[in-house]
Amino acid sequence: MVALPDPANAREWLESMTLIRRFEERAAEMYARAKIGGFLHLSIGEEATIVGSARALRDDDYLISTYRSHGHALVRGTPPENVMAELFGRVDGCSRGRGGSMHMFDLERRFMGGYGIVGGNLPVAAGIALASDHKDTDEITLCVFGDGASNQGTFGETLNIAALWQLPVVFMVTNNQFGMGTALRRHSAVTDLQRKGESLGVPGTRCDGMDVLDTNRVVSEAVERVREERLPLLVEAVTYRFRGHSMADPEQYRSKEEVEEWRARDPIPAFGEKLIREGVLDEASRAQIDADAIARVDAAVEFADASPLPAPQTLYEDVYVLDREVRGSYSLHTTELRREEEAAERDGAGDRSEIGQQQREREVAQQMTDAVGLSEETS
């Protein structure tokens, strides 16, 4: 039996899981009211996997997730207000309203995003880990992906290069039993997912993703081993999502009896009851945790609803565009650089050498645009 953390941490884990659950429930409600557009993927049922793994990390470690990423943003400390505003497509969202449900991002807290492409976050995680090695730090990267992504080409390519280059990544496959609506046994020849990396030089292990304590124990051990040995590991978290793949999922591929069987193992009441048995909480304290989570989510909805939509004139900000007709940004920074340059020229102030550098960067962007155009004309 896995021992509890100290009472303060145990309470915080329950608070975080409860907040994620109440946030996701309210997000579903807001989607039904057309406050949220596009796709919406909820992590209801997977809270123990999210919290248990994230609490194995240090603040300076990196976490990169999938399109099911609201809970990961919250557990890394992104305020619920900014996560909900992102779902609403508002300027106060954590991605300034431009990412939506699948593209949460918070660099300050080293949450490197949700990622809309299945398996697309795997090579990005390897790149982050490579950067940590180049900087000679002991940071590690936790890369979360679903069981369906373990069949993508990026899975094999990334695990191979991570093992070859000895990159400090913990790859965690969230095995919620379905790749979209296809059961694990029907989409993967190897259903023991912890073993999928062995032929690529990445050993694996497994945790009970419905148990926050077991998840934290297994991922903590993996994190420490990766931090010390600078070698990748694979963790399979066996869990279950109680809702559909997305809000548009009619869930015709599984029975109500199966869902109810997994709901009987709901990680939030299970952990709450354990804390009561161990004397960490009483029933009133648990009820208060739930009430506080609901109040925080209420405030997040109010904040998101009051946040303005992005102005139309900002449409091409921070967009990578190589086109003669529509000029966007060469990189993430050029929008701000252009504004600074224009302000400096207007005021007759500023460092001329810096302005010259900015102009040269814009010239490079134009050269790239011209090269692309020439390629299109000759192809």
Image: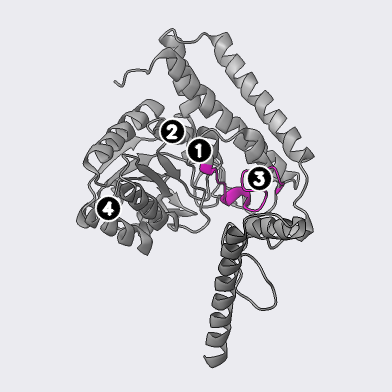
The residue at which mark 3 appears reads as 86
| Residue drawn 53% across the image and 92% down it | 378
Q: Is residue 116 left or right of residue 215?
A: right
Q: Amino acid at mark 4?
A: Lys
| Residue drawn 48% across the image and 47% down it | 112
The residue at which mark 1 appears reads as 109
Q: Amino acid at mark 2?
A: Asp
Residue 263 position within the rendered picture, expressed as x and y whole percent measured from the top left: 49, 32
Which is more foreground, mark 3 or mark 1? 1
Q: Quadrant of the N terminus?
A: top left
Q: Is residue 367 magenta?
A: no
Quadrant hosting residue 300: top right
Identify the element where label 2 is drawn: loop
Q: Which residues are magenta?
A: 89-107
The residue at which mark 4 appears reads as 196
Q: Earlier in the sequence, mark 4 or mark 1?
A: 1
Task: State whether residue 31 appears in this view.
Answer: yes
Residue 23 position within the rendered picture, expressed as x and y whole percent measured from the top left: 62, 34
Q: How many numbered tags mark residues here? A: 4
Q: Is residue 367 left or right of residue 125?
A: right
Q: Is residue 78 left or right of residue 27?
A: left
Single out the residue that lies furthest toward the bottom.
378
Which is more foreground, mark 4 or mark 2? 2
Q: Earlier in the sequence, mark 4 or mark 2?
A: 2
Give the main secondary structure, helix, strand or loop, of the magenta stretch.
Answer: loop
The residue at which mark 2 appears reads as 59
Mark 2 closeness class: few <14, some 14–19, many ≥20 residues within 10 Å: some
> Could you tell me if the residues under marks 2 and 1 are in contact, i.e. CB atoms within 8 Å?
yes
